[in-house]
Amino acid sequence: MSMLSGWGRFPKVECHVVTARSEADVRAAVLASPLIARGNGRAYGDAAMNRGLTLDMTGMDRMLSFDDGVLVAEAGVLLGDIIHTFLPRGWFPMVTPGTKYVSLGGAIAADVHGKNHHIDGSFRACVDWIDLMGPDGTVTRLGAQDDLFHWTLGGMGLTGVILRAQIRLRAVETTFIRQETRALTSLSETLTAFESTLDAPYSVAWIDCSDGPHHGHSLLLLGQHATKADLSAGTPPLKVRHKGKLPVPFGAPPFVFRGVWLRGINGVYWLRGAKRAGTRLVDWDSYFYPLDALNNWNRAYGRRGFIQFQCALPLNTATAGLAELMQAIAASGSGSTLSVIKRFGPQSGHFSFPMPGYTLALDFPATERSLALMEQLDAITLAHQGRFYLAKDARMPEAVAKADPRAVAFAAMRAQAGLTDRFTSVQSERLGL
């Protein structure tokens, strides 16, 4: 037995873990016990944990073929391994989340999104097919023509075990990003800037939620892949530099996540960013994965861990909904140092998280105070026809999940297909999926 947690280190659950190194290993596990597949453990909560059997897929980490940007790889391959192998050859992921340490199977199961969702959509945009093992051990190759394909992308591993997939990468000329930083002073100003820059290939904003929407200072980062012409003479266009990591050996004192301390930290961060406003070239790692530079940054919240809240709000209610969320956070006296807003484009798939509108992601220390605040944030999100990201969830009650008609349809599909008793997670049991 092993004590497991997600990236948030909350909750911690004792699980029986078996590592799969071949399709035969997966089949033996599927036929033996109800289970959930687990990649690199970067879901924040309890989505990749099963008390009975958690199937570790990191042993299946082979890249099988590559031809002109089309990669076939096993589910345990990490996105970072793909980048370090193919970026020096001029290829980069079409869609990437905020960490490169997610597995390919995990990216598919969560249908992850990135800073370019408003243009390119979620991870499904680059997936041609997946090989999925069902409850009887049979492997089926699924593509966009198959209904189960669209449930699997975003289905959090609850439709079967993803064995391998074919994905398409993006051709790039350099390893650099042309980044434009804009320092903004309120939520309304931030949303206006997003709407005026929808042609930017990548966009994301850090926003200060500690002092309400009218004082919500933000840093909007717009990006596009730099070309060779953007580089100074003599700069290697496709050199991938391997950076060292700064350690996070222990957690910060709890008081830094509250009141005047938090407002002060956020204020200094904004001022530092504002001084660097304008356009400059940054390396790919700094733009897409800034937190990956901190080794085990999840330790910053202490031994109890942290909880992430991430919701999506439709375009017609997003302005009012985000303002109400920020007001509730400010009134609580708690807050988040990692508050991020992104613009979403059209929804794709049956159970994927994004919808046309905006998403807000927040990190809170795992305390009773934070849990009480999240109940308020749940209610505000539902009142504005929003939804929640299962890859970040660690504590949502079943009633909140079932308020989303897609969750009800997903549970019904699983029951009809005979998946409910074979593929289960601590999260699926908690949410009634």
Image (cartoon, helix red, strand yellow):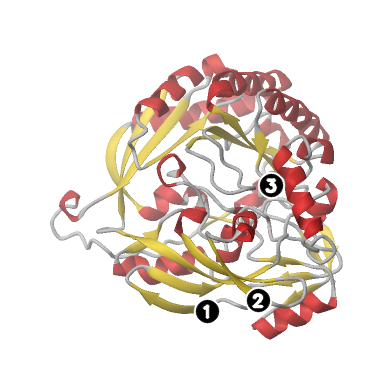
Q: Residue at x 76, y 33 (%)?
A: 370
Determine the CA span between mark 3 and mark 1. Answer: 27 Å
Secondary structure beneath disc 2? strand
Furthest toward the left, the residue is: 233
Type of amino acid under label 2: Val
Mark 2, Cα crowd under 10 Å, few <14 / some 14-19 / many 20+, is some
For the residues labelled 2 and 1, say whether their Cβ atoms are less than 8 Å apart.
Answer: no
Q: What residue did someone put label 3 on?
A: 390
Q: Is residue 431 left or right of residue 110?
A: right
Tell me the distance, in whole angstroms, between the alpha carbons under discs 2 and 1: 18 Å
* Residue 10 can be seen, yes or no: no
Residue denoted by label 1:
62
Give the foreground label among 3 and 2. Answer: 2
Mark 1 neighbour class, 10 Å CA radius: few under 14, some 14 to 19, many 20 or more: some
Q: Residue 111: x and y, percent?
A: 57, 53
Give the numbered dot on residue 189. none
Determine if residue 408 is in view: yes
Residue 273 image-quadrant placement: top left
* Mark 3 burial class by Cα count in 10 Å: few <14, some 14-19, many 20+: many
Q: What residue sits 63% from the left and 52% below the top? A: 154
Find the distance from the CA under tag 3 to the CA under tag 2: 26 Å
Viewer-nearest residue: 403 or 97: 403
Q: Which residue is mark 2?
A: 139
Residue 21 vs residue 122, the one in the foreground:
122
Q: Earlier in the sequence, mark 3 or mark 2?
A: 2
Identified by mark 3, the residue type is Leu
Quarter of the image containing the N terminus? bottom right
Identify residue type, mark 1.
Arg
Q: Earlier in the sequence, mark 3 or mark 1?
A: 1
